[in-house]
Image: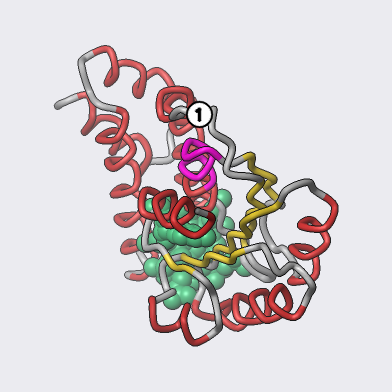
């Protein structure tokens, strides 16, 4: 079994204690950080499919998520780009009612590597909290809102509406997450949309330049 396949299987099985060493082994064997990360993202799709099929339940999803986070910790220093040219501060969070943070954390990592200073509000973030954070921090040029559930798409809409109704005229808003489409992003008045962490970083730069 290749080292990357081993990483994938350990995430699916939620083996948090073994994953760090396995990711390191995959790197030592010449694996590229982006490929190892993609293998872990793929594992989470498998986990989601098993959940949909009723083969596993919330606790198993949770332990797989923990394993993935530990694997990402090993890759994080290797994924950081040149952020010497500051593009300002980006406030990021997962919207109210939503506890999913793996995708948001990857997006945060990639936007940071594009040259932003990140302020991460975590998960279950009420709309007003994005505005408060944007006012409390210096030079906020971007607010990034993540949502993973179809049931929290209205919370994304509320977050964008609340930000747009505040006096943060120089601040752009980007949204994303599995159920979000470019059409939905446009409909709720977001300035930008991205389908994944890599394109979120590209879009973030584009929005503030
Ligand atoms: Co949940 N969950 N979950 N879950 N979970 C999904 C999302 C689901 C698709 C599983 C399924 O049914 N197949 C389903 C949603 C269905 C729907 O709404 N259509 C679901 C459900 C139903 C639920 C609960 C309701 C289950 C329950 O309690 N009965 C519950 C809700 C809790 C809540 O939030 N209130 C729940 C709970 C959980 C756990 C807490 C157990 C755990 C999350 C732990 C954590 O995040 N720390 C969990 C997990 C792990 C998943 C799956 C398996 C994996 C999510 C993940 O991390 N993916 C997921 C199934 C799946 O995704 N296939 C599922 C990997 C990650 C890298 O991808 O998050 O999509 P993703 O992020 C991507 C893009 O979406 C994008 O870039 C990221 C990286 O490329 N992106 C952005 C994300 N944010 C962005 C922001 C941007 C731009 C791009 O700009 C700002």
Give how far across and how far down residue 64 sits, in percent: 45, 45
Residue at point 40%, 18% (across, down): 21
Assign a secondary structure to mark 1.
Answer: helix
> Which residue is most to the left?
1
Q: Is residue 118 left or right of residue 162?
A: left
Residue at point 50%, 31% (across, down): 70
Give how far across and how far down residue 61 sits, in percent: 47, 54
The image quarter containing residue 79 is top left
The image quarter containing residue 172 is bottom right
Look at the image and give the residue range highlighted in magenta: 108-115
Residue at point 39%, 76% (across, down): 181
> Which residue is most to the top?
28
Q: Reply above or below: 105 against 70.
A: below
Q: Is residue 104 visible?
A: yes
Q: Is residue 56 visible?
A: no
Residue at point 29%, 35% (across, down): 34
* Label 1 beta carbon within 8 A of ligand 1: no
Find out whether residue 109 is within the magenta segment: yes
Give how far across and how far down residue 143 sits, in percent: 63, 60
Can you identify the residue that label 1 sits on?
Answer: 73
């Amino acid at each position: 079994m290749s080292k990357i396949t081993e990483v994938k299987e350990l995430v699916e099985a939620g083996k948090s204690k073994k994953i760090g060493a396995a990711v390191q082994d995959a790197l030592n064997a010449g694996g590229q950080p982006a490929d190892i990360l993609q293998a872990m993202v793929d594992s989470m799709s498998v986990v989601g499919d098993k959940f949909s099929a009723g083969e596993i339940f919330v606790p198993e999803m949770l332990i797989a998520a923990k394993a993935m986070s530990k694997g990402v910790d090993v890759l994080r220093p290797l994924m950081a780009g040149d952020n010497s040219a500051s593009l300002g501060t980006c406030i990021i969070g997962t919207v109210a009612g939503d506890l999913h943070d793996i995708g948001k954390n990857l997006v945060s990592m990639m936007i940071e590597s594009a040259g932003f200073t990140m302020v991460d509000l975590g998960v279950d973030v009420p709309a007003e909290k994005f505005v408060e954070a944007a006012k409390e921090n210096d030079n906020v040029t971007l607010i990034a809102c993540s949502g993973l559930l179809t049931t929290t798409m209205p919370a994304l809409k509320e977050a964008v509406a609340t930000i747009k109704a505040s006096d943060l005229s120089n601040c752009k808003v980007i949204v994303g997450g599995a159920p979000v489409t470019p059409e939905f992003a446009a409909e709720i008045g977001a300035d930008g949309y991205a389908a994944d962490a890599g394109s979120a970083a590209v879009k973030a730069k584009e929005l503030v330049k």
